[in-house]
Amino acid sequence: DVFDPAVVTVGRIQAGTTNNIIPHVAEIEGTIRTVSEATRAKVHDHLRRVASNIAEAHGATADPEIILGYPVTSNHDQFADFTLDTARTVLGDGQVHRLPNPIMGAEDFSYVLNEIPGTMMFLGGTHPDRDVRSAPANHSNLVVFDEDAMPVGVELYAQMALRHLGAE
């Protein structure tokens, strides 16, 4: 389902200590990213089944250990609308964009959203001399943030708090 995607990334494979000895143990590590808990559970089941079946086909056993990590980050519709409306008021219509599809990012803010209704949003901080479409991503060592965006973010958060508390 293109609107409920899953990404499994294998980031590390370790087996043995040299190239000419068959290892006793092999380890595979990676990440799993989904945008729904249902798909997350399906991926976990599928990976356990695949690991067990591959091991069994080779006369071995598998002991898959899946560490859950961050929960799925899911905005609440009511607060997403509130956030968009406030952002448009503060920044202007042309400066606010609703993402058409969920993103695959893992974020500790998901713990907050599991407890109380809210919204995760992004504040653009691409330097004015860079094209946002080709600028390095946030986690790149080449990223350069426009620090002038910080006061804008503070104003946006302050306005959201005031509006939410009814003190506009």
Image: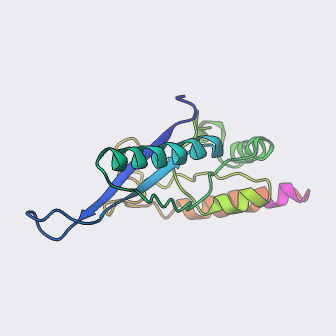
Image quarter where the N terminus lies is top right
The quadrant of the image that shows the C terminus is: bottom right
Image: magenta residue range: 161-165
Q: Is residue 22 magenta?
A: no
Image-based side of 95 in relation to 131, left or right: right
Circle count = 0
List the single residue furthest toward the front.
Answer: 59
Q: Is residue 150 above or below residue 76?
A: below
- Residue drawn at the location 53% of the way across and 48% of the way down: 44
Q: At 39% across and 41% down in the image, what residue appears?
A: 133
Look at the image and tell me whether residue 129 can be seen: no
Residue 161 percent across, percent down from the top left: 80, 61
Per the picture, the main secondary structure of the magenta-coloured stretch is: helix
Q: Is residue 44 left or right of residue 129?
A: right
Q: Is residue 44 above or below residue 154?
A: above
**Residue 95: horizontal and vertical position, in percent?**
59, 41
Q: Residue furthest top?
A: 1
Relative depth, front residue between 131 and 70: 70
* Residue 165 in view: yes
For the point 58% across and 52% down, which residue is it?
122
What residue do we see at 66% from left, 42% from top? 92
- Along the line of sight, which residue is nearer the eye, 147 or 23? 23
Residue 5 locus on image (x, y percent): 52, 36
Given residues 18 and 138, the one toward you in this image is 18
Furthest-left residue in view? 20
Left or right of residue 160, residue 33 in this image: left
